[in-house]
Image (cartoon, grey):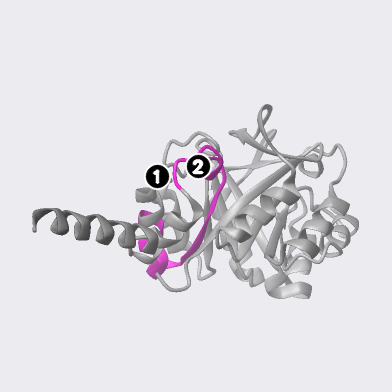
Amino acid sequence: MTGFTIFPAVDIQYGHAVQLERGVSSSQKVFGDPVVMAHRWRQEGAQWLHLVDLDAAFSRGSNAEQIAAIVAESGLRVELTGGIRDDASLERALGTGCDRVNIGTAAVEKPQWCDEVIAAFGDRIAIALDVRGGRLATRGWTSTSGDLWDTIDRLNQAGCARLVVTDTDSDGTLSGANVDLLEQVCARTPAPVVASGGIATLDDVRALARLADVGVEGVIIGTALYVGQFTLAEAVAAARGVEEPDMVASAATVESREKEGRT
């Protein structure tokens, strides 16, 4: 599927790469050094990286220096999110060298500021819509406020370049992608949509890739990659609608050997 992007996620908490279940900090599973993880995803074929500064999201600090090192050393394009709610935090985020930032809480709490930022920075700004029911989760998903559909309508008027839509109830749970939600969002906006939350199988990846025609341009995958549900290469191949080349080669070798055994 040309143009459909797989974004491996690296969530940073207290300097470590972690994964949370439904965004709950106490549910963390630690997977090591974020710089090492970024290099791993590059080696496995990633072009983009989705970085989350959880400490900034929970208003308890910032991992900006570490994130800047990842941006500089990984060779990947980077989408950064977490705690970007005012001019200072936006400047700090953009100062890491990332390609774009995702703004979440401020889209609900500071709509005028958010609209001004969209106008000023264009496609370097994406809006993260973290959806819990028909409402938006904010402040590191610790509270819920703002109507999803009203917010999308306002963002359309502001000229928002991109939406990142997360089903918070499924995030980190391996419970499957919320295809219905994504279809509804795409029907409401002309902006391209990046999907997130619940990805568990290659069928989930294929289902989202089939939504490319209605506006889904990629998917963020975290837990499924970290726990070995599938590899990044397999996800990329699934999105393109083809088998992983190495798997094809392996199957051909087996078939050849079976033929040799029959002769």
Does the residue at mark 1 contact the one at mark 2 (Cβ under 8 Å)? yes
Mark 2 nearby-residue class (10 Å; few <14, some 14–19, many ≥20): many
Q: Which residues are magenta?
A: 207-230
> Could you tell whether 224 is left or right of 85 in the image?
left
- Amino acid at pointer 2: Ala
Residue at (53, 68) in percent of width and height: 192
Residue nearest the observer in this picture, 8 or 159: 8
What residue would you read off at disc 2?
224
- Say whether residue 105 is visible: no
Give SS at disc 1.
Answer: loop
Residue at (37, 64) in percent of width and height: 245
Residue at (86, 55) in percent of width and height: 89
- Residue 203: where, in percent of width, then height? 34, 49
Residue sitting at the far right: 88
Q: Quadrant of residue 43?
A: bottom right
Say which mark, if any, is on residue 201.
1
Residue at (86, 45) in percent of width and height: 62
Location of the N terminus by quadrant is bottom left
Residue 255 is one of the magenta-drawn residues: no
